[in-house]
Image (cartoon, rainbow, N blue to C red):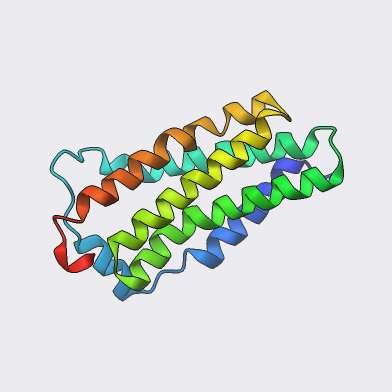
Amino acid sequence: MIPSWLVIGSIAFLVSFLINRIPSDDFRWFLRLKRPSWLTIEFAIPFIWIFIFVCLILSASIIWDTDINMGKKILLMTLYLGLEVAILAYTRVMCAFRSLLVGVFIGGGGFFLGLILAGLVFFTNKSALYLLIPYLLWSPIGTYVTWAMIPLNRDAI
């Protein structure tokens, strides 16, 4: 039998591949944005997100392997998928609209979706809940960075 983490990880990779196809003009716009001077760890952000995605995949795998009814499993897997889409939509949609404010709304919405997921996972499996914590800690930071970029990029509101 194929391990759940491999199936869930493969689905996450496929979704990421499909959503994260940012047109080059949009990506150049994103790279030209001014960042706050205090943002000194930008080089580490891709690694932070990789770590968070690994944690989310492991959390979803634990939930899938937990002995709960299939309806609850499907609900939770749908929320995990929705959270991944929200995370990936941040850059894709923000760049398409060329609006940092859109990024703030997507980032904030993703955080609240993560809180809802964490609330439901809390009653299902504590190990899976602990693996959601990196996202719940980092998401508000990333959203705040986007918010702090708005005054530096008045043409990108």
Q: Is residue 152 above or below residue 53?
A: below
Q: Quadrant of the N terminus?
A: top right
Picture coordinates of residue 86 (x, y %)? 51, 56
* Picture residue at 24% right of the left edge, 61% below the top: 31
Q: Quadrant of the C terminus?
A: bottom left
* Picture residue at 71% right of the left edge, 29% below the top: 123
Front in this rendered view, residue 146 or 119 = 119
Picture coordinates of residue 54 (x, y %)? 56, 39
Picture coordinates of residue 6 (x, y %)? 70, 45
Left or right of 131, for residue 20 = left
Q: Is residue 93 above or below residue 116?
A: below
* Picture residue at 72% right of the left edge, 34% below the top: 62
Quadrant of residue 117 within the rendered picture: top right
Picture coordinates of residue 155 (x, y %)? 17, 68
* Picture residue at 42% right of the left edge, 49% below the top: 108
Q: Is residue 49 above or below residue 122?
A: below
